[in-house]
Amino acid sequence: MIEKLKETAKFIESLTDVKPHLAIVFGSGLSSEELLDEITKKIPYREIPHLKTSTVQNHKGELVIGKRNGTNIYLFSGRMHYYEGYSAKEVTYPIRVMQYMGAKNLVLTNAAGGINPDFNAGDVILLKDHINMIPDHPLRGKNIDKLGTRFPDMSNAYNADIRKDFMEISKKTGYNLKQGIYLALQGPSLETPAEYSMIYRMGADLIGMSTVFETIAAVHGGIKVTGFSMVSNECYPPERIKETTHQDVVKMVKKSEHILMELLGEWIDNYL
Ligand code: HPA
């Protein structure tokens, strides 16, 4: 694993001098490069040694390296998912590369179904916690002590200090930012009404198919995690459920992308 990471890092370093400080993963429908004021390099995932590529529509599969206000940023446009047939270890390989290259912060974004009856399609929600219900785990198998401890603590997985900063930022920008618990199932089918009701009873506010593996790997690796869900469809109570296609999800995410970008931009400029 360490050998592989070394090779991947060496390849990236042969193309740019910019080392990651902040890594951002953009999920379904998100692609905004405007967050960066300087783009140094764009590398398709398939050209990067040992990295898998995203097979999902509207997931670009491209690493965009650049800067904003002097902060070095690695922007992963599109991600790999468990439902694509990738293991939790493959899904989290980009996070390990970021750890190996010295990134200190990670922002994970996703499209999600809104379980909390107060959450509406178009809302941007700050993640405060997660529930992993995907039947795999990125730390399964022998622990690599060089990467992190065998039993990482998860009590502050979505960094509370950074969440405080985002709550303050949202007051400034005038956005009513709410926080929620994200539950991940493997997908790729969306859930039945009975499943959405189960997720509500389990105590989650959001449902999706990603993010939790990346959070676990980052916490294991000592990277601070921040997560955002873009609510694309309403899932509970059952009267709120509407038939939803992937196109509907992407359309809704696009609509609220500017809100997320404003929050992130302010954070990078004045808090990070
Ligand atoms: N379920 C799971 N994942 C999702 C959903 C959903 O309803 N909407 C967007 N991602």
Image: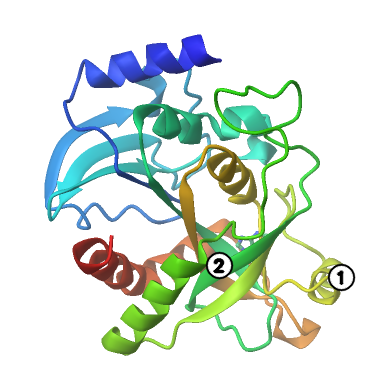
Numbered badge on residue 198? 1
| Image position of 35 with respect to 170: above or below | above
> Which mark sits nearer the N-terminus, 2 or 1?
2
* Residue 30 seen in the figure: yes
The residue carrying pointer 1 sits among few (fewer than 14), some (14 to 19) or many (20 or more) residues within 10 Å by Cα, namely few
Q: x and y percent of residue 3 in the render?
A: 48, 9
Q: Nearer the viewer, mark 2 or mark 1?
A: 2
Residue 59: give x, y in percent of width and height: 44, 44
Image coloring type: rainbow
Rendering coords of residue 125 (x, y %): 51, 74
Foreground pick, 70 / 38: 70
Tell me the amino acid under the disc marked 1. Met
Q: Which residue is mark 2?
A: 127
Ligand 1 quarter of the rendering: bottom right
Q: Is residue 238 left or right of residue 2?
A: right
Residue at x 58%, y 50% (from the top left corner): 211
Mark 2 close to ligand 1, CB under 8 Å: no
